[in-house]
Image (tube, helix red, strand yellow):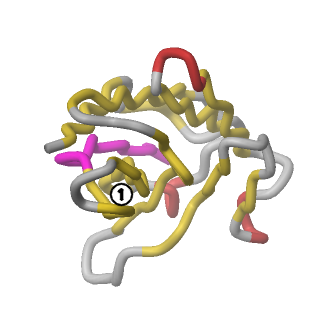
Amino acid sequence: QVQLVESGGGLVQAGGSLRLSCVASGTIVKINIMGWYRQAPGKSRELVAGRGSGGVTDYVDSMKGRFSSTRDNAKNTVFLTMNSLKPEGTAVYYCYANVYNYRTGSVDYWGQGTQVTVSS
């Protein structure tokens, strides 16, 4: 089993910055992809950024240039730095990981989510 634990959410004013962290622990042979989704009130969950172990990151177009995701493969950790935040960025941010181990193969896991609130 794999656990993902996020931290770093909170309340920030529009134009401000936050940095989210997510640590994966448990039975892990390899993390194929590690990244972030978010879900705003009344909306479906959407991809924010996904990062492969080779360093390639995909971002949603509206977040390019403002959001940056980095990974520390040795520590099974992914970060999301969010700059120039807008009120529409208010959402619960979820960490996800596609993890390979010998018994289960590749499986998707999710964190419990961390609230980000951007005030105008």
Q: Is residue 109 magenta?
A: no
Left or right, 2 with respect to 80, comes to left
Q: Which amino acid does label 1 sit on?
A: Ala
11 over 89 or under it: above or below: above
Which residue is situated farthest in the front direction here? 102
Q: In this view, does 101 lie to the left or right of 79?
A: left
Which quadrant of the view contains residue 29?
Answer: top left
Residue 12 in the image: state x and y as whole percent.
45, 31
Q: Is residue 103 above or below residue 72?
A: below
Residue lying at 61% horizontally and 56% vertically, measured from the top left: 50
Query: Residue 7 placed where, x, y %?
Result: 32, 26
Q: Where is residue 45 in the image (x, y as percent from the top left)?
A: 37, 75
Instruction: State the SS at label 1.
Output: strand
Residue 5 relative to residue 85: left or right: left
User: How many labels sit on residues?
Assistant: 1
Which percent across, then down, holds residue 78? 52, 32
Q: In which quarter of the image is the N terminus?
A: top left
Q: Name the residue under label 1.
A: 91
In this rendered view, identify the residue nearer to me: 7 or 104: 104
For the record, the magenta segment spans: 111-120
> Crowding at label 1, few (<14), some or many (≥20) Cα neighbours within 10 Å?
many
Q: Is residue 60 above or below residue 16?
A: below
Is residue 114 located in the magenta-colored stretch of the structure?
Answer: yes
Tell me the chief SS of the magenta region: strand
